[in-house]
Image (tube, rainbow, N blue to C red):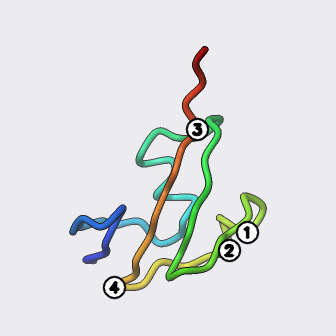
Amino acid sequence: MHIYLNGESKNTTCHTLLDLIQELALDGKRFAVEHNEMIISKSKLAQTLICAEDHIEIIHAVGGG
């Protein structure tokens, strides 16, 4: 299925946002997810289905000092 991830075209076999997070190896890291212009809480990632042509933005926190 074709989606847009952080503004770039991507093909994926993931069915939920949680699947996508796991595919991107972001499990356990600090991040925020926007799905079709709506912020999705981490508790809803497993229930949020991905459809063709969805726009997904994932922003992960980077620490530093």
Q: Are the residues flagged by discs 2 and 1 in contact, CB closer than 8 Å?
A: yes
Which label's residue is closer to the chain start, 1 or 4?
Answer: 1
Q: Which residue is mark 2?
A: 47
Which label's residue is closer to the chain start, 2 or 4?
Answer: 2
CA gap between label 2 and label 4 equals 16 Å
The reply, left or right, for residue 1 in relation to residue 48 is left
Give the amino acid type for the residue marked by disc 4 in the picture. Answer: Ala
Q: Which residue is mark 1?
A: 44
Which label's residue is closer to the chain start, 3 or 2?
Answer: 2
The quadrant in which residue 29 appears is top right
Q: Which residue is mark 4?
A: 52
Give the amino acid type for the residue marked by disc 3 in the picture. Answer: Ala
Which residue is rendered at x = 49% and y = 56% of the image?
Answer: 58
Which residue is rendered at x = 30% and y = 65% of the image?
Answer: 12
Element marked by disc 3? loop
**Label 4: how many Cα within 10 Å (few below 14, some 14–19, many 20+):** few
Give the amino acid type for the residue marked by disc 2 in the picture. Answer: Gln
Q: Are the residues flagged by discs 2 and 4 in contact, CB closer than 8 Å?
A: no
Which label's residue is closer to the chain start, 1 or 3?
Answer: 1
CA gap between label 3 and label 2 equals 23 Å
Element marked by disc 1? helix
Q: Which residue is mark 3?
A: 61
Which label's residue is closer to the chain start, 4 or 3?
Answer: 4
